[in-house]
Image (cartoon, rainbow, N blue to C red):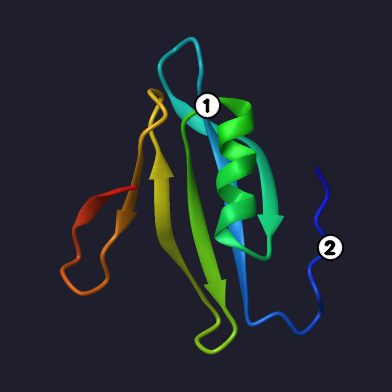
Amino acid sequence: MTTRIPWNAKQVFYASETRTRKDGTRCAGREQRSTTFREAREFLDSLGAPGGVSVWRASSDLTDAYATRDADGSWTSLNRLTGKWEPLS
């Protein structure tokens, strides 16, 4: 799945699959850049693998954690007001 990111995008979502090696260490697997969280979520759901989504914002030029997908398919998102991870429906 290829997504074209506009050069003047205000935010970009990075979805990355989490892989576990035979020795137990975790590493990044396949990745995708998206213009919406929905596209990033669909990418990880189609893989059926755990992973995470981070967001880059042009206003701050920083990348922050946004949501994670567990191996069982459940999603959690970071609540910026409380700093806690909450289930995402």
Q: Which residue is mark 1?
A: 49
Residue type beneath disc 2: Arg
Question: In this view of the protein, which residue sits in the foreground, 39 or 10?
Answer: 39
Residue 8 x/y as whole percent: 76, 85
Q: Residue furthest front?
A: 89
Residue 83 x/y as whole percent: 20, 65
Q: Residue furthest bottom?
A: 59
State the mark number for residue 60.
Answer: none
Q: Secondary structure at mark 2?
A: loop
Q: Residues within 10 Å of mark 1 (few under 14, many from 20)?
A: some
Residue plotted at (55% across, 82% down): 61
Residue plotted at (52% across, 26% down): 49
Give the answer, above or below, for where 40 lies relative to 4: above
Q: CA distance from mark 2 to mark 1?
A: 23 Å
Q: Which residue is mark 2?
A: 4
Residue plotted at (56% across, 34% down): 45
Q: Are marks 2 and 1 in contact (CB under 8 Å)?
A: no
Q: Earlier in the sequence, mark 2 or mark 1?
A: 2
Give the answer, above or below, for where 30 lies relative to 3: above
Q: Residues within 10 Å of mark 2 (few under 14, many from 20)?
A: few
